[in-house]
Image: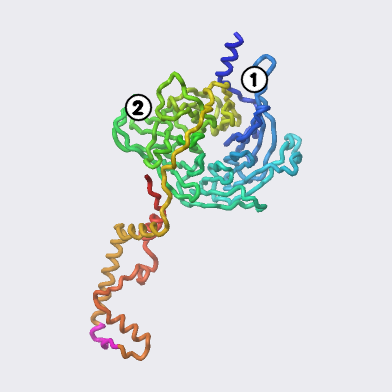
Amino acid sequence: MVERIAKSEMTAMLHYMPEIIWHDRDSLLSVDFQAQHDGIVDFYKLVTCSLRKEVRIWKMDFRMLPFGTEDLGVYFIANLVGHRATVNVARFSPNGQFLASGDCDGCIIIWKIDTDSPNLMLPRDDDFPSNVENWVRYKTPLSHDSDICSLCWSPDSQRFTIVSNDESIAVYEANTGDIQLKCRRLWHMRSFRRFPNGVVWDPRGKYIVTMSTDRKLDILCGKKGIRLVCIQNVRLPNTILRRSNLKAGDYKLFHDDQLMSFSRIPDFSPDGELLIAPSGILETGSSNIFGTFIFRRCDFPKGRPAAFIPSSKATFRISCSPILYKLHKKIVNNPLKLPYRIVWAALTKNTVYIFDSQLCRCIACATNLQYNTLTDMAWSPDGRVLMICSLEGYISFIRFGEVALGEKYSGKIPRPPPSPLLERKGRNSLIQVDEKRKRESSPPNSLLKFFKRIASSQTGKKGDQTKTSKACSGTSTSENRGKEDASDCSDESRTVMKRPSDFENSKKESDVTVRNKKRAKLTTSPLL
């Protein structure tokens, strides 16, 4: 009997929701676990942010009660004050030393524990406890023009990227080692996408992936900020999915701006082999099929998903467990051909789904956890706790047994193949490509023909005047007069083509030419 109870606890999936006023009953917008925790005492450090202008840090642990059940304990650590508007997102760095937070005013703050005075008790009012840890403002990057929608750290914790409601994406260097408060901006791309609201960094440090409300997923070079791939549609054959007949044709992959969610955050698997994107949709006409798309790293150049997992409602947040698991021995099927299993969670408005990469289907789900809409979630570093917050102002914790999701993979991870995308060409080759496109594109050619006719008509009018003028000779008294006569006596075959800016009636370049130049600057790199 005891062995049966112990076995059930190892495979159990328990739900905890402590009755704690996390942010004075305000709606919670973002939560995250610190990447490193003390495995001896088994506690976790987490961060929360809400509609208030504060960021709060907590500790939690699971303690065994005398009658054999676990109890969840939560302890207040610090209240970080520095923002002047609602804090939308907060994320710990992978090494656990830094904390980045962004608000509705476009302000970003990097926090760090002050080791010189770790036990400093900051003054607070009587209704709120004093800080246990002294978190201070470490860096303050340049502010953006609108909300900070999402942010993520690079794997080495040296840089972080943000996407803003001002349609821009930027990468900053967080740990520069100097005493200046400002972060150095590595690159910044304006007019990137309409409302980009999700970003994730490749665990191998090469790519940055963003999602936006214009139904596009972009893969960028993390070092230079070059857009490499844009994924928005796919051509499918005749397919039967969930009793719906999909006819052959092109289908949009992602939901439009009618999806009422503040964020659309994809995630990479811990090994970087899989990219899992939320907000998937297949429009069949009579009814839409919602779900999640899985992209393999080797298929990035094609922009074609490897799998589509349906769900009852639209997903908007993906979070992968940081642990790799062994394959199921009794199951031969392995469509993604990985030597281990990857487990991830997908979040909808009221449900969280748990998926398995070997089965490519849902293995568990929890619904109606909160009365209000779910907003964010995060996995603990050991993969045993899934934290979910909501607009109701409470946090749910799903506790998994030691083998509830499977045994940990202890084998050697195969060496990853080289990334499928090539580097961008040199500047000289890009200039040649731009000039060639300018010559071959139809709008500039039509404009040149138009101005050529104007130039030929003007030279025809001047022809009558040149016949009655004096013959050109090299005996002019001044050097400038000689140059003017030489230009008047040029052959008809040497018709000088003037640019649009040289004419009196068009002092500026045409809008078509300006748009063509901008299009040439955004040349994507070639794919394999």
| Magenta highlight range | 465-473
| Residue type indicated by callout 1 | Glu
Above or below — where is 500 with respect to 169? below
* Badge number at residue 70: 1
| Residue type indicated by callout 2 | Leu
SS under mark 2: strand
**Is-magenta flag for residue 469?**
yes
Tell me, yes or no, if residue 20 can be seen here: no
* Badge number at residue 213: none
Q: What x and y, as percent, mark residue 441?
A: 31, 57
* 3D distance between C-alphas at marks 1 and 2: 42 Å
| The one of 482 and 124 positioned closer to us in this rendering | 482
Q: Are marks 1 and 2 in contact (CB under 8 Å)?
A: no
Residue at the image position 33 percent from the left and 90 percent from the top: 476
Left or right position of 146 against 491: right
| The one of 47 and 97 positioned closer to us in this rendering | 97
**Pointer 1 local density, CA inside 10 Å: few below 14, some 14–19, many at least 20:** some
* Badge number at residue 241: 2
Q: Quadrant of the C terminus?
A: top left
Which comes sooner in the sequence, label 1 or label 2? Answer: 1
**Pointer 2 local density, CA inside 10 Å: few below 14, some 14–19, many at least 20:** few
For residue 501, which quarter of the picture? bottom left
Left or right position of 354 against 505: right
